[in-house]
Structures are given as structure tokens and as C-alpha cells.
Amino acid sequence: MTWEVVVGIETHAQLLTGSKMFSSASTAFGASPNTQASAVDIALPGTLPVANRAAVEHAIRFGLAVKGTINRRSIFARKNYFYPDLPKGYQISQYETPIVQGGEIRFLIGEQEKIVQLTRAHLEEDAGKSLHEDFQGMSGIDLNRAGTPLLEIVSEPELRGAKEAVAYARALHSLVMWIGICDGNMQEGSFRCDANVSVRKTGDQKLGTRCEIKNLNSFRFMERAIEFEARRQIELLEDGKIVVQETRLYDPERDETRSMRTKEDAQDYRYLPDPDLLPLVVTEKMIEKVRADLPELPDSKRQSFVSRFSIPAQTAAGLTSSRSEAQFFEDLVASITAKLPPSDPKYKEVIRSTANSVVGEVTAALGDSGRDFSNNPISVWDWATARLRIADGTISGKIAKDDILPALLSGEGSTDEIIEKRGLKQISDSGEIERLVDEVLAANARQVQDYRAGKEKAFHSLVGQVMKATRGKANPAQVNELLKRKLS
Amino acid sequence: MSSLLYSTVTELSAALAARKISSVELTRACLERIARLNRELNAFISTDEERERSLAAARRADERRARGDAGPLTGIPIAHKDILCTRDFRTTCGSRMLEKYRSPYDAHVVHELERAGAVVTGKTNMDEFAMGSSSESSYFGPVRNPWAKSRVPGGSSGGSAAAVAARMVPAATGTDTGGSIRQPAALSGICGLKPTYGTVSRYGLVAFASSLDQAGPLAKSAADLALLMNAMAGFDARDSTSLEREKEDYSRLLNTQKIQGLRIGVPDQYFGEGIQPGVRKAVEEALRWFTAQGATRVNVELPHLPLGVAVYYVIAPAEASSNLSRFDGVRYGHRASEYSDLLDMYARTRAEGFGAEVKRRILVGTYVLSHGYYDAYYLQAQKVRRLIVRDFQSAFERCDLILGPVAPTTAFEIGAQIEDPVKMYLGDIFTVPGSLAGLPGLSIPCGFDESGLPVGLQLTGDYFSEAKLLGAAHRYQQATDWHLRVPTETPL
């Protein structure tokens, strides 16, 4: 019997605003406990909430980016429950009428585009934090986070399996950062996902009983948690047991999910429209103002990269994984184009290899040094120069990757200075190369014999030896040609 | 000295302006009277016992006068209902839960009155969290009516009403959710105004039912109410339900409001069963005065009025059950001294901190919001609320104001109704509909019943018609002296 794993994701994206959802306290992360909690945040008697306009604009921005419906009138509601880190005894959220309804997220699975529908996205405030350690049998409460604006984004259960779920979450993660509404920092909890997982027999229309998995604070954990949970449910069903609807917590240490609370313990939140807040009215003018500031979206940019530069969709997807990366690539293209006209026969290949270098070695090198494109120290001009120097035969691609890139990262000067200082120019003096080829041939009589006996592999080994002898500076095409001539 | 205490805010303001008296002198007189009467009336929960704070404020007011930097309220002693947050006095809401609670900030209303130069003499007693119509549910004990000390002064702003009636202060603030300014004003023989919802900021008013709560003034005359409203009303960005309107002068129609041609709506229900004969007689007499001055009596119908109390006692407890969740013993206020775990801490804290009426309303409110009951109670109540709004809107197409009694009875004996909540709730029958609609309502004295207890006349107007209501009342008070009568049991 085959099983289909069905996943829906609920995401809490912390909105990038200076102040909280309903108060003027700062939202900066990492301050000493309770230093960023105003009278409103700690729910002193008599205090009242006032909705943060910037958070509302961020929600509109998201709604436009996912092509959802922006409700012109949405309602803040109170979700009532008692918990020490919930100062008012209720959380202000949106219940029946959220600010954004519908919409879609597009992402690639391989070269295939997948479209997932969103149910809704609504504004709400975060709770504080309960600290259960270090207080000797008591709990500490930190209300710095209380009232932080969140956008809760709910997908339809249209994801099939852990890989798709993670691809969706990654696409959503890069989108919210792309449009500037969330910093995407998962360690600090700025982007948190819960997964609703159920399984059903392949072909069944009816959804199985779902479990909600919490505490997925990395994409790796999300994948493992969903895989574990799906396996757990399938095993239950195959043993003739049933899945109980419940909330489960993922434990990364043990790589398993554990029951937190069952549906029977589910609280009655006694939602009611918040009488302290008028209905949230979004005018056409507000929408148009946000729309005017909206950058080109990653989907559209990805498609335009594919058609403009004839690069594979996956490469284009990589280039558009963040706005700063896409910008870096576009700036490289502009710099290269200023020196090498598109009519040049080499142009297409230069752009294509440049694209590969950005998603490949540059991304990797930045990652290794704990950075990304948003704090990329490599100047556009230097990397463009490196690509052009490959095109004009001054250096090889390998030299660019292994020598120039690290040197640029550690700030050793411009590309041309690095080439000069480190003596990285390709050896184009054919006499010098010929001398080295002769040396290599003389020292490797066996490989020469093997090659002559028809072993192509032996030829590659000889090329490698020559390149090694030149410390990578020989023009590989020239070496190939010389070797072939000498061996024929 | 005693004549000072007889005087209205308007008169005192003129005397201060003319330097006939000083604020220090006036404030001292009030503080002395408070000290003398409070033990028997229990109108105040907190008073300025050392008197230093009030007298310092009075001296500052006198200095402002001397600099020529004074407004009408500069140097006028007042008292705040103990549900408005103050830095200088604890804010208890009449509850054990907040017995020792000190707010780090002043309510908007408190701040505005201080800016106007009013001198705060103390915080007045009230029904716990403003839940009640008799001021008996206070943790600090019942307030006594200056007209008959065995009786209630009304509620929930009963402390403010008793303080003004007993001439302890010339004016006080109150809050009105379903009649909590108008009804105690009526039962204590003084004037009170519940403004249009959204006119006075709720910031710093400890919430009972957010969609209904509104602060307003209590004083001896309509003219005095207008002076207080001029300071209290106005937009405040910290209250999302505060209305962004230009400042208005609530005194502007005091001398120009015409009674001739005024269309006075009189709903039949206001004179139906359950209303005491003494109340009916006094209200009808007041109506006769208006018609004798050329006003026209218009019969208006408010078909959903009889549902008002039922709707109110769903919506107000629903909101209260949520608003009072913050009193959980975690951050401030009362916390049980012994408990076994978190749930036990919540349960004991709230069991000890809240009184019976508050618990009753939290239970009702929790019930009507619960899964499976929400539609039948809360949603249904909201629908009927809209019908009541519509009733008033069509009534105000035919009349300028609606006249009737404030309450069906005069002041009742302490303890007579406390065991019968439904009977107590039915006493709100004439005040609750206007609250549900967010309309302004004015309560002024219009006579006495056969036992010599004051009767209140209610004038309800369309939105933002406060100045008109005050103008009409002022004309009436120029022709009558009910509002100047001094309670028999607290003579000067």
C-alpha cells in the first residue's frame, strides 16, 4: 500500500517594525528582560491598544506579493486564555475576518514549478516568554517580546511530503525577506513554522486525521520532523490503529515528535471582536501607496532571468533566493555588459558562467565566512573584472575561484591587483608551456603509452600534470592542443 | 465659609477670578468637610489625609490665577472616581484585587483636569469595577446617601455622587457603562452627564465593558457639567475609539438654547409599569414645565427598549470577562499567599480578589462567549443592540431630545436589593438603552418623592448633542431650584 503525506504550514513571521503591534515600545531583539515592555505591553489597568500602521502596511505588502485579497475591513479579535506570559489574558489577533485572504506561493521542485494556495494571513501580537530554568522552582517572565507584531500565514494542505513542505517554507522565507517585512532570522524566532501533517492512502480524497507539529526552528528540523511524523502515522495506520488529533512537539535531540496536548485538552478561546479597536479599514489609497513601493517579485525576476540570459530555472531560482543576491547578479551583468557588448560571441557564455559562479562559489564562500549577499564585501566591479579576465584568457576559472575570490573576501585589493601581485596570469608564452609539456611527457612514459594504446583517461592525467606544473596558470585549451600535437 | 460649599463650580470660578476667595481657602474647606463626613458616608476610598498634596496644588492654582494664566477650573477642588488611574493616589476600582495598586501614569481625563488647574482631593468609592447600581459591592464598604444615610446613593459612581451631594467637593468625575453616572446623580439629587461614546478618552479608565464605558462629570448644575466637559472631552490618539473632532465649547448654548419649539420625545415605556408614583409625578411635572415654555411633546416609539437590559447584561459581562482577565496575580494587584501550582494560583487569587458581583458577571460573560453559546447570546445581543440604535435614530428624526426618568425608583435601603441581582439590573432599564446606542444622557434633579428622596430627570439626545442637552437643562435650572437643595442628613 502506498501513502500520501499531506502537509499544511502555519508560519509566524515577525514583522520588521520599530515598535510593537499595539504599543510604542521597541521590538529590538536581545535587550535585558522586561526593559522593552511598556504599560500597554504589561497590560497595566486602563491601558489601550493602538494598531501599528507600519505593521498593517507590511500585511498589505504581503497580500499584494502573494496576489491575495486585501480585506478592506478586517476585525481584531481577542483570543482569551490564561498564561503568565500573556499579560492581558488574551491575545489580540484576527479571527473571522483577516486582513489577507487567499493568495499563492510559487516555488520550484526540481525544474517544476509548484503553486500552493494560501488560506489567509492575519495580524496578531506575540506573547512574552516564560523562562523555566534558573529560577529554582519558579518561572521567570520576560515581556520584551509581548506585543511584537506577527503575520500568521496559513497554507492550504496542498504540500505533499517533507521535501515540498520545506521548499514551500524556504520560498515563503525568502519572499518575506525579499519584500522587506521580516528579517527571516529563525534562531531569534522571527520566522517560525508549525506543520499540520496527515497521511492518507494514495488516491483517497478525504484528508486523514492531522497532527500539528510545533518547534520547527530550522528547515532541516522541519524536514526531519515531518518525515518522522509521517512515518509514525503510517505505522499506526498499518498496525490498524488510529491517529489522534493532537499537537506534538519536535525534539531535535532525539529526532522525534512528542505529544503536547490532545484535542480534548483544546481550550475554548472565547473569541470576541476587540471592543478597544475599531475595524481595521484599508483604503484604496493605502493599497496603492504600498503597491508603488513593492519591488519586482522573485517569481517574475526568476522568469525574466531565464528568458533574458538562457540560464536554467534552478540557477535563476538560486539567483533570486534573496533580493541582494539578485541585485548583485544584475549589477555584475551591467558591469560586464559595459565592457563586453552582447553582440560579442562570448557574451552569453560569460553571463551564464557568471550566474553559475554567483549561485556556486560566491554563495559558498560568503557562507563559509558567515556572511550572505546582504553583507557581501566583494565589490561588483571586482567580480565582474574576474569574469572578464576569464573571458579574455588572462586567468582560468579555477584561478578565479580558488585564488581571486578568497583574496577579494579578505580585502587584498582589486582583482587586477591580485592577479598582478600573486602572479596569477595564465602562461600564454607557448615556448614556456612547450617546455613544461616536454618535461611532463618525459617523466610519464607509461601514461604516454597508455594513451597511445587508446586510454583517453591517461590524456586527462597528462593535462592535469601540466596544469599542476604551471600551478594552474596555463591556458587549458592551449595545453590540450600542444599535448595532442606532441602525442600524435 | 459654609457658603463656599453651597456654591456651584460656576460661582466659585467667578469668585476665584474676582479674588474674593483663594483656591487654598476653598480646598481647605473641602478637605475639612471630607474629613468630617467621610466616616459616615464612605464616599471616598482615598483622601489626601496630610492635605499637603491638595494644598500644594491649590497654591499652584492661586499662582496661576495671579499670573493671569487661569481657566474656569483653575483652583476648583474635585474628586476622581477610583476607576480612573492616578499617580498621586492608589487606584483600587473598589476591589480587593487592586487594594494597594498604584498606577505609574494618570488617566487622560485626570491629566486634562489637572492641566485645567483642578485640585484633586481624593478618589471616590464605587461598586467594584463599576459593576453595580448601588455602590454596595465595593470592597471598601457601601457608600451612604446624604439624603438618607440608610439608603444607597446609586452606583456605580455612588462615591462621586454622594461627595458632590454632601458638598464635600463641588464636582467629581464618574464613569458610566449602563447608567453609572446618571443613576447615582439621580438618586443623590445632583447632575451627571454621560457623554457620547468616544468623546472622552478611555485611556486610564480601568475597563469594565469597553464598548460602553465613558467617563463624565458629576456636579450641582448643568452649567458646571459644561465647564468640566470642556476640560475632559477631546481626541486622544491612545484610545482607538476616541473620536477625532474639533474641541467644542459645551457651555455655548447655556443661555441661548430655546425651549420654545423644542420637540421633546416621550416614549410610553418610560411611564409604564414598575415606575414609582413619586418618580412619575416629578418627571411629568418637569415635562409640563418644558411644554409650558413652548416645547412640543412628541410621542416616540422605541420598540426594542424592553430588550435593553437583557442585551446589556450579555454584552457588558462578555467584555468584562475578557477585560478582567489581566487581574491574574502575575504582575500586579492581589496574589493569593498560598497555592500549589499555576492554576491554583489563578483560582485562589481571583477567588480572593474579586467580590460576588464581579464573579457573577465574569461567569455570565464567560458563558455567553463559550463555544456553542456565542451565536445564541453574544451575537444575538449585538444584533438587538443594532436594532436599539436604529430605534433611537428614527426617534431623533422626530424629536430633539428624549425625556424620561433616570431610574424607576428613588434611593433604596442598603441591603434591600443586593441579594436580588435581577431586580438590581432592572433598575438600569432607562439608562442602559442610551449606553448601548452610545448616546449622550443627562441626569438632573427634578423634585422629590413623598419620602423626600430626590428624583432624577433624564434627557437623552442624538450623538454630540451634549451642548443642547446642557442648554435645555440650564434653562430649566434657572427656573427651578431642585438642584440647589441641600441633603437633609448632611447639613452644613
Image (cartoon, coloured by chain):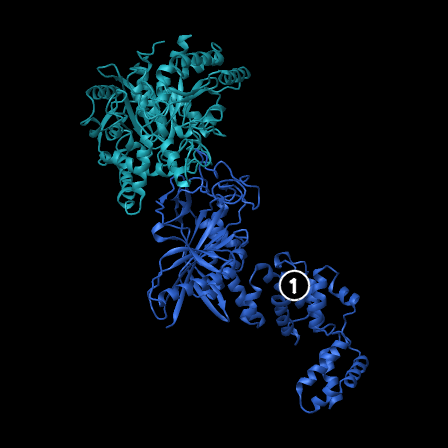
Chain colours: A blue, B cyan
Which residue, given by chain and number where applicable, does mark 1 sit on?
Answer: A365
The image quadrant that residue A399 belongs to is bottom right
Q: Residues within 10 Å of mark 1 (few under 14, many from 20)?
A: some
Q: Is residue A405 above or below residue B175?
A: below
Relative to the observer, which residue lies in front, B345 or B420? B345
Residue A410 is left or right of residue B83, and the answer is right
- Could you tell me residue B257's position as x and y percent? 34, 23
Residue B61 is left or right of residue A412, and the answer is left
- Look at the numbered disc 1 and give the secondary structure of its residue: helix
Pinpoint the chain carrying mark 1: A
Position of the C terminus of chain A, as image quadrant, is bottom right
Amino acid type, mark 1? Ala
Report whether residue A438 is seen: yes
Q: Is residue A283 above or below residue A455?
A: above
Residue A452 is left or right of residue B49, and the answer is right
- Could you tell me residue B355's position as x and y percent? 34, 30
Relative to the observer, which residue lies in front, B163 or B389? B163
Residue occupying the point 49% across, 36% down: A39
- Could you tell me residue A127's position as x and y percent? 46, 45
Please tell me how many numbered marks the rendered image carries.
1
Residue occupying the point 54% across, 15% down: B66
The image quadrant that residue A365 belongs to is bottom right
The image quadrant that residue B11 belongs to is top left
- Could you tell me residue A136's position as x and y percent? 51, 41
Q: Is residue B293 above or below residue B397?
A: above
Relative to the observer, which residue lies in front, A409 or B115? A409
Residue closest to the far top: B1
Position of the N terminus of chain A, as image quadrant, is bottom left
Q: Is residue B424 above or below residue A453?
A: above
